[in-house]
Image (spheres, grey):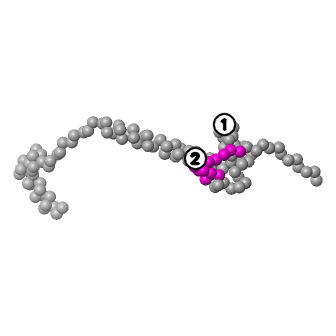
C-alpha cells in the first residue's frame, strides 16, 4: 500500500505572558490537547471574516441559537452599567410631583343629609352585613 504523502505545514507560535495573558493561558489549559490547533484556526478564520470550515462542524440548530443568545446576553451585560447610569440620571432630573393628602369626608359631607346617612347605616346593620 503506497504511503500517504505528508501535508506540508508552517509552525506559527506566539508568546503568552503569565501576568497580562492569564485569561488566554487559562483558556489554553482548558482546551483538550487535540483541539487546540483547530480552535486557534477557527478563531483566526473568524477574525479574518472567513468563517469556520463547514465540513468539520456539526450542524446543530440549537447550538446556533444558544450561540446567538449568549452573544446577546454578553452585549446586554456590557451595556447595562451605562444604561442604568443614564436611567438614574434621567430619573433624578424629572420634576417631583407633589401629592395632596385626601382626608376622609365627615359623615353627611358627601351631599347627603345627616338623617339620610344615618338611615342607610341603620339599614345596613339590620341586614346583618
For the residues labelled 1 and 2, the Cα–Cα distance comes to: 27 Å
Q: Residue 37 at what x, y percent from top left?
A: 72, 48
**Residue in the image at 67% along x and 37% along y:** 48
Up the image or down, 30 lies above or below 74; here it is below
Identify the element where label 1 is drawn.
loop
Can residue 114 be seen in the rendering of this structure? yes
In-front residue for pair 43/118: 43
Which quarter of the figure is the C terminus placed in?
bottom left
Give the extent of the magenta segment.
Answer: 13-28
In the image, 70: left or right of 90?
right
Sequence order check, earlier mark of 1 and 2: 2
Find residue 49 and name its label.
Answer: 1
Q: Which residue is mark 2?
A: 20
Identify the element where label 2 is drawn.
loop
Q: How many marks?
A: 2
Q: Residue 73 at what x, y percent from top left?
A: 52, 46
Can residue 66 be seen in the rendering of this structure? no
**Which label sits in the foreground, 1 or 2?**
2
**Residue in the image at 65% along x and 39% along y:** 47
Amino acid at each position: 500500500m503506497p504511503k500517504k504523502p505528508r501535508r506540508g505545514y508552517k509552525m506559527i507560535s506566539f508568546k503568552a505572558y503569565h501576568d497580562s495573558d492569564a485569561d488566554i493561558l487559562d483558556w489554553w489549559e482548558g482546551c483538550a490537547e487535540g483541539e487546540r490547533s483547530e480552535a486557534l484556526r477557527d478563531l483566526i478564520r473568524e477574525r479574518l471574516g472567513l468563517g469556520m470550515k463547514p465540513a468539520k462542524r456539526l450542524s446543530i440548530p440549537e447550538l446556533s441559537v444558544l450561540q446567538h443568545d449568549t452573544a446577546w446576553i454578553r452585549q446586554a451585560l456590557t451595556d447595562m452599567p451605562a444604561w442604568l447610569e443614564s436611567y438614574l440620571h434621567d430619573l433624578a432630573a424629572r420634576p417631583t410631583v407633589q401629592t395632596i393628602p385626601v382626608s376622609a369626608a365627615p359623615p353627611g359631607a358627601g351631599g347627603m343629609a345627616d338623617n339620610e346617612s344615618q338611615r342607610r347605616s341603620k339599614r345596613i346593620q339590620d341586614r346583618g352585613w
